[in-house]
Amino acid sequence: MEGKTVVRTEEAPAPFQGAPYSQAIVAGGLVFVSGQLGLKPGHTEMAGDSIGEQTEQVMQNLAAILGAAGSGLDRLVKTTVFLTNL
């Protein structure tokens, strides 16, 4: 069985300090990306005030993580979007 590889890029927000998850894991030729918020890398506040601005940032974060894993948005198989206040 193929091993798992942790994906990490500075082009997307890091997991919260002490959080037990990675930005993504590559296993079996697939990339599993953790949930993303509309945060800019290195910031702690949401990107912009509108849902549009925040959604755009989420997609930029997702693209950066997929790129670091050697993949991209054009290879997405499934995604789930939660539009609610945490």
Image (cartoon, helix red, strand yellow):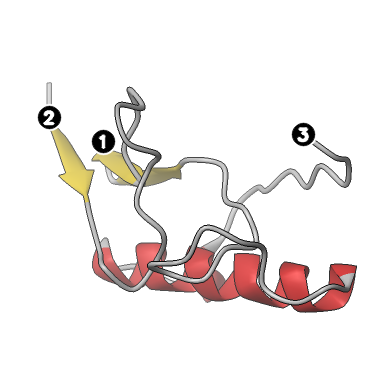
Residue under the point 38% across and 67% down? 42
Q: Which label belongs to residue 2?
A: 2
Q: Nearer the viewer, residue 38 or 79?
A: 38
**Label 2 CA crowd tier, 10 Å (few <14, some 14–19, many 20+):** few
Whether tag 2 and tag 3 are in contact, CB under 8 A, the answer is: no
Q: Nearer the viewer, residue 47 or 75?
A: 47
Disc 2 and disc 3: Cα gap in Å?
Answer: 35 Å
Q: Viewed as shown, does residue 33 lie left or right of 20? A: right
Residue 21 point in image, percent of width and height: 35, 29
Q: Viewed as shown, does residue 34 lie left or right of 25? A: right
Residue under the point 41% across and 59% down? 13
Q: Viewed as shown, does residue 74 lie left or right of 66? A: right
Which residue in the protein does label 3 denote? 86
Q: Which label belongs to residue 48?
A: none
Q: Amino acid at mark 1?
A: Ala
The disc, 1 or 3, on the residue closer to the chain's N-terminal end is 1
Q: Amino acid at mark 2?
A: Glu
Residue 20 point in image, percent of width and height: 32, 22
Whether tag 2 and tag 1 are in contact, CB under 8 A, the answer is: yes
Q: Quadrant of the C terminus?
A: top right
Q: Which label belongs to residue 27?
A: 1
Q: Amino acid at mark 3?
A: Leu
